[in-house]
Image (cartoon, helix red, strand yellow):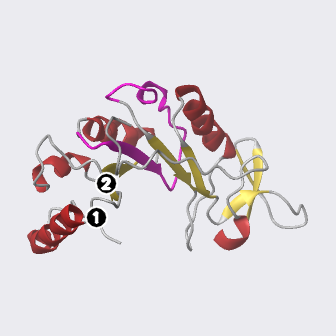
């Protein structure tokens, strides 16, 4: 996995191969996730006429990154624009970007951090984004808790995050249920569709 929009000239030949592959596979939806949404227009060959099967997303970990990357993402003419709030490291208000307008987000993914230095994610942050997506009728996908989850076994060491006690149990054990269910929202695939998302 790599950021196709990284400003490295050595990637130019790989990008060219990718653009050709995308052209040859109109039946596949291509999800391009980047921390550099402003570079997408400059590094793709499509100008303002992107293929309908190319989705563009950006990573936003907190409100600071949302402010910096969101406006750049929403300038893109991609058929589906999405954000990956992973790892979610703070409260984010996406509500002004959620809805049915042409300059809105079409999908939101949320997940916690994993690895040796993983920080816990406050469940209130996740619920806030889930509820914003519900109000804006935008698909919400909860990918994972990461290494930390709300307390299930009070005998284990806990850490208070916001108003919730969290335990470090590892990504596999932590799972991906939020409030007793999984959230697998997805936008409608673009291939074969004749109108906007």
The question of residue 83 being in magenta is answered with yes
The residues bearing labels 2 and 1 have C-alpha atoms spaced at a distance of: 7 Å
Residue 16 drawn above or below residue 194: below
| Number of other residues with Cα within 10 Å of mark 2, as a class: few under 14, some 14 to 19, many 20 or more | some
Asked whether 10 or 189 is in front, the reply is: 189
Image coords of residue 3 (percent x, y): 28, 64
Image coords of residue 105 (percent x, y): 40, 36
Main SS, magenta region, reads loop
**Residue 170 visible at all:** no
| Element type where label 1 sits in the image | loop
**Residue 188 visible at all:** yes
The question of residue 133 being in magenta is answered with no
Q: Residue at x 34, y 61 (%)?
A: 28
Q: Number of numbered discs present? A: 2
Instruction: Please name the residue that numbered disc 2 is placed on.
Output: 35
Kindly identify which numbered label has been placed on residue 3: 1
Q: Earlier in the sequence, mark 2 or mark 1?
A: 1
Asked whether 14 or 124 is in front, the reply is: 14
């Amino acid at each position: 996995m790599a950021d196709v929009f990284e400003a490295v000239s050595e990637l130019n030949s790989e990008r060219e191969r990718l653009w050709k592959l995308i052209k040859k596979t109109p039946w596949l939806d291509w999800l391009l996730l980047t921390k550099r949404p402003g570079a997408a227009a400059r590094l793709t060959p499509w100008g303002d006429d992107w293929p309908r099967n190319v989705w563009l997303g950006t990573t936003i970990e907190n409100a600071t990154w949302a402010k910096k990357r969101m406006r750049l993402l929403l300038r893109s003419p991609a058929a589906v624009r999405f954000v990956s709030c992973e790892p979610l490291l703070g409260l984010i208000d996406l509500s002004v970007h959620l809805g049915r307008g042409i300059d809105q987000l079409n999908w939101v993914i949320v997940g916690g951090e994993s690895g040796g230095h993983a920080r816990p994610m406050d469940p209130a942050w996740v619920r806030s984004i889930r509820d914003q997506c519900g109000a804006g009728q935008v698909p919400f996908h909860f990918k994972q808790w990461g290494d930390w989850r709300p307390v299930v076994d009070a005998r284990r060491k806990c850490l208070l995050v916001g108003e919730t006690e969290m335990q470090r149990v590892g990504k596999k054990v932590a799972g991906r249920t939020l409030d007793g269910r999984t959230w697998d929202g997805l936008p409608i695939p673009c291939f074969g569709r004749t109108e906007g998302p």
